[in-house]
Amino acid sequence: MKLLFISVFLLSISSVQAASIYAGKSKAAVVCSQCHGVRTTSAEAPFPPLAGRDKEYLKMALRQYRDKTRLSEIMNNIAGSLTDKDINNIANYYSRQK
Amino acid sequence: MKKIIKVNQTLMAGVASLFLLAGTVQAKSDMHQLYEDNCASCHGSDHGGYIAPAINSETLKGRSPTALRSLIMTGSFETLMPPFYGRLKDADIRAMVKYLQSTPKQNNPPWTIKDMKKSLKIYVKDESTLPSKPIYQIDSMDDLIGVAARGKYGRGNGSKAIFINSKTHKIVGEIDTGTAAHIIDFDPANSRWAYVKTDTAEIYKVDLFSMKAVRSIKTGYNGPALGVSRDGKYLMAGSFVPHNAVILNSDLEPLKLIELEGVDPDGKMVSSDSGMIIGTPFADIFAIALENAGQVWVVDLKDGFPITKIKNVGRHLHDAFLTHKGRKLMVASYDDSIVIAIDLKTRKIIKKLKAGCVPHVGGGAAVKVNGRTLGFGTNFGTCNNNTVVSVWDLDKMEVVKQIPVSGGTESPAAHANAPYVAVDIITKDRRARTIQLIDKKSLKVVKTLDVGGHAYFPEYSADGKFLYVSAGYAGDEVVVFDSFSLKKVASIQMESPAGIFSRGRVKYMTRGLSPDEME
């Protein structure tokens, strides 16, 4: 069960900005918010919210999804192509959202 | 933390059922229901497309079922297509793909006056029990701004009409609409009432003083068109599915059903989607655009509701705006890339004016500059990257300028007291996060604002001091800017906000004109 769609998409938008929150924002805004929202998840959807969560927790979760020590069909695919820098930026961005 | 734990449990249940139920065989009628309950509000009850593309055996022919399944699970990024992972069982998603690839576009399902009458729901029986003034603090009812919060899935708990005091930027009321709210129209004669129409053609009558829905009726399967007469006594609603329009009284009782069919500019008899419907301060009439027939009909609000048909207006009409005290109507025609000026008094075409690529004027905008009344028209399309906002002199009815902007546009905002005309860039990439500001005097783009989400439907507050913009699709806020400094002053959270409607519009008719002397 490979979600080619997501991986291809992620590759095409991977960015190299230095400003970490902005880089985190651009990735989060395009990809992650599709399921997790920016500030709130949909009242109708079964996705955990990310806004305002502990930064270290988010980093850990993403690393676990990436190395598949935490299993989720969707998140393993999405995190699979994230670099350490991406993970830092995104965790930084979401942890600051209220 | 509680919420997170609960959410994860539902999620686990969803993931578990994904494996347990794989292999269940679905009956066709079940699939039809599943489609109606999850997809039809965007893709059309007839599978013929609505605010999303047509999905049927023809349009999905030869597509890989695996790719379609992935797409339905994750949704399509930066569009309104939501992720159904964990919301539908995997077996259902697979069966849905099969069902879609084997189901042709359906005939128009009937929805008669009888069906409408049966669907009328009354939430407040005795309207005299409603409060005589707003139960919240507000200087003037014109300060109300209504936002169509679509909800991520176009239905469910996230779908609401949300009302905001545009001086304090605080929410003063929320109306659950079941499916995505699309249009909010205010009663010009009585500041108490607003009407909200959803993607699935329900109309809610809302008491703005108590912020409660008092009645609702279902006028069709899909279709956003809605107009309110200048005296507030009549409404008219039009549908894509089926092809008709209905006149109602203000108690939402249907009075007359009108079938939308006619001869198009190429001489073919066609059945037609309903385009815009508009009431005007000029007369007791409604104007309705027949999208596919290319005609504009003027309905007189008197005995028998007689209709005057204006033919050969354009190929694929959509929306329109009013000028000259509501006597002139500017109608956009997608396929000929023109905007047609119609005189509602003589009921004749005045002139066809050149627009940009696929004109979509939204609510339109008109401003007075140096003695001229200038109309602004946004254009959806991106023909060879030639993206412009059209400006016309509405007195002389001639093109003044085609202003280059960074992408396709959908809706302009203007206000007599604000220096800029705002347009939303909708081209599907990072540009969709932005709006551009056009200086009224120089007619040049002077600033681009990154709003976030999919930035669309800009609207000024009634006093012109603030610019509201939806950061929609996967975004979840309405962002408020100072009209002069263009600094962000507030953020109002909601799920997938779209159309923004100021009650001030009933005063100035078309955004940008002076509220003091209706022009």
Image (spheres, helix red, strand yellow):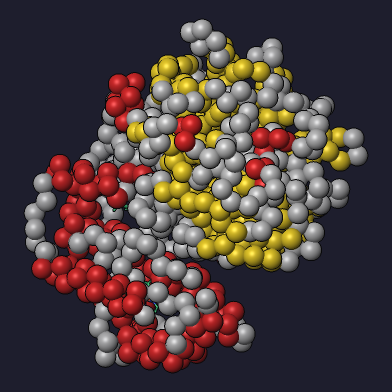
Q: Does residue A16 appear left or right of residue B321 in this picture?
A: left
Q: State which quarter of the image contains the C terminus of chain B.
A: top right
The residue that appears at 62% across and 24% down in the rendered structure is B230
Q: Is residue B273 visible?
A: no
The residue that appears at 37% across and 71% down in the rendered structure is A6
The residue that appears at 80% across and 35% down in the rendered structure is B516
Q: Quadrant of residue B376?
A: top right
Q: Residue furthest top?
A: B303
Q: Is residue B118 visible?
A: yes
Give how far across and how far down residue A43 sits, in percent: 37, 62
Q: Residue furthest right?
A: B370
As drawn, B217 above or below B499: above
As drawn, B474 above or below A12: above
Q: Does residue B60 appear left or right of residue B227 in this picture?
A: left
Give how far across and how far down residue B177 sits, in percent: 41, 46
Judging depth in this view, the residue of B110 and B331 nearest the camera is: B110
As drawn, B289 above or below B182: above
Q: Does residue B315 appear left or right of residue B324 in this picture?
A: left
Q: State which quarter of the image contains the N terminus of chain B.
A: bottom left
Judging depth in this view, the residue of B293 and B145 nearest the camera is: B145
Give how far across and how far down residue B217 sits, in percent: 38, 32
